[in-house]
Amino acid sequence: MTTRTTTGDAVAAARPDPLGYLGAEIQALREQSLYRPLVVMSGRQAPRTTMDGRPVISLSSNNYLGLATHPRLVRSALDAVRDLGVGSGAVRTIAGTMELHEELERRLASFKHTEATLVFQSGFTANSGVIPTITTERDLIVSDALNHASIIDGVRLAKTARAVFPHKDVEGLETVLRDARDKGGPKGAYEHILVITDGVFSMDGDIAPLRDICDVADRYEAAVMVDDAHASGVLGRNGRGTIDHFDLHGRVDIQVGTLSKAMGVLGGYVAGRQHLRDFLVQRARPFLFSTSHPPAVAAACLAAIDVLEQEPERIERLWENTRFFKAGLEGLGFDTGISETPITPVIVGQAETAQRMSRSLFERGVFATSVVFPTVALDKARLRTIVSSEHSREELQICLDAFAEVGRELRVI
Ligand SMILES: *Cc1c(COP(=O)(O)O)cnc(C)c1O
């Protein structure tokens, strides 16, 4: 047995730090106003909460419908913990598939009107898992320029050729597809083509032109994949997503949804045909090599679907609040970009302005985080706001008043 004779500090002094360059990187980020400290919440994820010790009205969560604290979800989770424990104890493909996991997948499939679904640990792993799993080096992936990071990572993990089309530019997409058909790739004609788009784009809150994308993809026999993370629980009947919103059932081959945003819990899923699910079960690496959700997560997600089906008024309130808040910001003269959903950016330009604005709002009890490069372009720094169904009119008005004061102070309006 060895005894410790040196303290950690003494070890640190004796040995040069091979990761010392990270400190310099952090310093550089601070100097460019790009460093983002973590803000710590005390208490619950609710419109009124406490961030870094200060009571605030929060405009920054993805808890669109208040389901993160909904009593029905909480009760279901507690029941599952009491009956089944806190962990699943294995990956799905070994001994970690519980009845609740499969029940959730059946419920999601019927909710989404697809043959089958497969749940992943998160929306991120759903995207980064499905894309490399279903493509090979003889295929082509065509992706919208503003797709989510988890799609980008999924594409990076794939061995396919790849092309990016300008944001929401269906003609640009068609040009890529026509070139692919006419010229093929280094290995000859592509075997399969996969077109990928977000349903709702997470930084601008705009909606993909899905019908046109499906039409173009059909002409080139390309598969279509839609990441509906910000549309799940928000768009379509009872929050079924953009495919339902545009009435495109049966025309989108792969739908990715998240259980972590409006659904209020954690997880992601892939919805589509039975053979898609079956293949992912055999091959998708996050599914094969990472432990399944605790039963409480699956139980709470099941309750979330019940709530979407039985309390559609939450979604109506979400949209009423969205219209009120957006009109308020626009009335004050803010640039809210091209948003069509509850995600409303307040675009200010420079990162430093965005961070100062966020700090000033915080001092006035309004929590709206800044989003800066590399999440958005260098000159498109913004505050990103998301209202929920649970904000009261009074709370939203307090936020608008604070935005007005701070916006004038910083000469943004
Ligand atoms: C949030 C988000 C994800 C990731 O979902 P998680 O369940 O939080 O991992 C994927 N895609 C988009 C477009 C998102 O906004």
Image: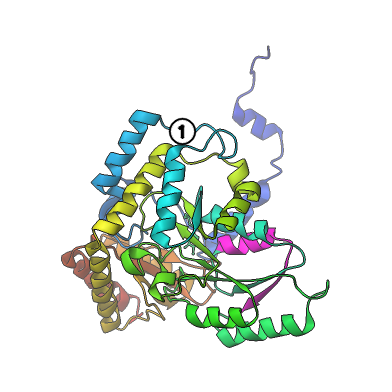
- Indicate left or right for 138 with 197 as reference: right
Query: Above or below — where is 292 with respect to 49?
Result: above
Can see residue 259? no
User: Which region shows up in magenta?
Assistant: 149-165
- Residue 328 location in percent, x, y? 25, 78
Amino acid at circle 1: Gly
> Which image quadrant for residue 143?
bottom right
Residue at the disc numbered 1: 87
The verdict on label 1 being within 8 Å of ligand 1 is no
User: Label 1: how many residues lie within 10 Å, few (<14), some (14-19) or many (20+)?
Assistant: some
- Residue 362 location in percent, x, y? 31, 60
- Residue 17 location in percent, x, y? 69, 41
Is 386 in front, or is 147?
A: 147
> Which image quadrant for residue 7?
top right
Can see residue 231? yes
Identify the residue shown where x is 58% and y is 46%. 287
- Indicate left or right for 61 with 171 as reference: left
Residue extending farthest top: 1
- Indicate left or right for 278 with 271 as reference: right
Identify the residue shown where x is 27% and y is 71%. 319
Identify the residue shown where x is 46% and y is 59%. 257
Q: Is residue 136 covered in magenta?
A: no
Give the colour scheme shown: rainbow
Where disc 1 sits, the SS reads loop
- Residue 357 location in percent, x, y? 36, 69
Q: How many marks?
A: 1
- Indicate left or right for 266 with 141 as reference: left
Residue extending farthest right: 187
Is 131 in front, or is 69?
A: 131
Q: Quadrant of the N terminus?
A: top right
Is 257 in front, or is 8?
A: 257
